[in-house]
Image (cartoon, rainbow, N blue to C red):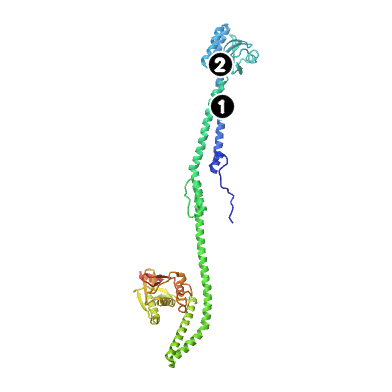
Amino acid sequence: MSKKYPFKKSTQASFWPFIGLSSLQRTLLLFVVLPLVLLTALGIRFGLDQASQFQNQRLKNDLELIGRAISLPVGTALNNQDLAAVNLALGSVFVLGEVYGASVFDVDGNRIASAGITESDLSDTSIPARIRSTGEGQEAFSRVRGRNVFSHFLPLFDATDQIQGLIQITRKASDFGRALRQLTVIAWLVWGVFSLAIVAAVLLGHYGGVGRYVDKLRAHMQRVAEGDLAYRAALEGPSEVASIAQGLNQMLDSIERANRELDAHRAAEAQFIAQLKDNEKMVAIGSMAQGIAHELGAPLSVIDGRARRLQRSGQLDQQALRHVTGIRAQVDRLTRTVRQLLDYCRPAATTPRTLAPAQLLTDVIAAIEPELETLQRQLRSEIAADLPNIHGDAGRLELALLNLIRNALQAANSEVVVAASADATHLYIRISDDGPGLASEFSLATLLEPFFTTKSPGEGTGLGLAIVQTVSDEHNAQLSFKNRAQGGCEVCLTLPLSDNSRDASA
């Protein structure tokens, strides 16, 4: 059952500004860029408020300076009752280009002189009274002739420092907002460009510094999820991403080691099971062989003994002698079959010792000579001089070599060659024949199975090569078969040399 993890694959957002962005990019925009943009917007708003206050104060100060500048000549003209001088002084304020109108009023608010657009009468307002009571200038927004204006009022003093009237300097209220509107437009345009630049910088910076490496890591994990466990992620990018890639590689290395160990355990388990099956088979065959040897051994000995006495009695004719000889041959065949069963199933109680390969092969060839005459085959030996000694059990090795040579004699047309050679580490015993060779449909494992034989029924038990393989395993040797190019089969028994033999040959 697969394990479920609390993880959902990120998908594209449904709202248009975030389409095509990764989850990490959206997180950066929401929690980094957006707060930064909002803070800059608040900063611009605060700055614009401060700029508006500064601009308004500057414009008011300008009017106050203009009023103070003309208050002295206007006051002097009023003391002299010179209205022409008053009008001339009022007209001079328009030279600055920032004044919309100028007027002179008496202490009760009645207009004495004016220039431009101003209030016609202040007697019904509180401004004259406030100026008389405070002796300081006043400010006020009002509507004159359908236009919003801003006016600054200053008291006019006579020679005895008594208020004799007041002066009004007026400018349009729109002058206060025009410069601020321009500044506001410029400020928000700069903010917009700055915000776009921040978004672009964050997205590009994320991709260049983190995003592309994360994409590579995701692609690597996708390949691993598809089964490519041999692929390893590149250790690149920021240290955090590289450490994740390194951890993933280490995890894959651990999985690979665990798989190798698991395969080794499985192979060992399979070998153990195969060995257990072989042991069970050997037990069954051993029990059967012991039973056969017990039941057939004594009768076969009696039959062979009586047939031998009949041969020696001299009372039989030629036809009877042939029958008796045939009986003895079949008894010998049955005896050899029982012996092979016992040799195959008998526990390997070997007694290894140092052996001379040349002498071992000479003894085997001498033992097989009677069969050479019977089968009418030739045996040629090619044993190299000064072969190094080997370490093994002479009886078991003779048994294996006898079976190999016997098989070669039975398969050969006319000749069998026994050759022996050695190198620095191994002794090679090759037995070849000039027969038809091995059939291609039979593998080495099949040929070594007990009771498997390619001979006709009654000509073999199928235990000869199985016995050879058992002896080979006892001596840590290797057994191989191949068909020769010139015809026939070659069997090679490769035996490891003893340490003393290697030292002597060196």
- The image position of residue 464, as x and y in percent, is 45, 76
Query: Mark 2: which secondary structure?
Result: loop
| Distance between the alpha carbons at the discs numbered 1 and 2 | 26 Å
Structural crowding at the residue carrying mark 2, measured as other residues with C-alpha within 10 Å and reported as few (<14), some (14–19) or many (≥20):
some
Q: Nearer the viewer, residue 233 or 413?
A: 413
Q: Which mark is residue 438?
A: none
* Image side of residue 199 versus residue 397, left or right: right
Give the residue furthest to the bottom.
Answer: 315
Amino acid marked by disc 1: Gln
Task: Return the residue nearer the eye: 287 or 135.
Answer: 287
Question: Quick one: 335 or 269, which is closer to the camera?
Answer: 335
Q: Is residue 445 visible?
A: yes
Mark closer to the chain start, 1 or 2:
1
Number of residues whose C-alpha sits closer than 10 Å to that of mark 1, classed few (under 14), some (14–19) or many (20 or more): few
Q: Which residue is disc 1 drawn over?
A: 50
126 relative to 444 in the view: left or right: right
Q: What residue would you read off at disc 2?
A: 100
Tell me residue 80's x, y (percent).
Answer: 57, 6
Relative vertical location of residue 422 with respect to residue 365 in this rendering, above or below: above
Residue at 53% across, 32% down: 191
Expressed as whole percent of the image width and height from the top left, the position of residue 31 reads: 56, 39
Q: Quadrant of the C terminus?
A: bottom left
Q: Amino acid at mark 2?
A: Tyr
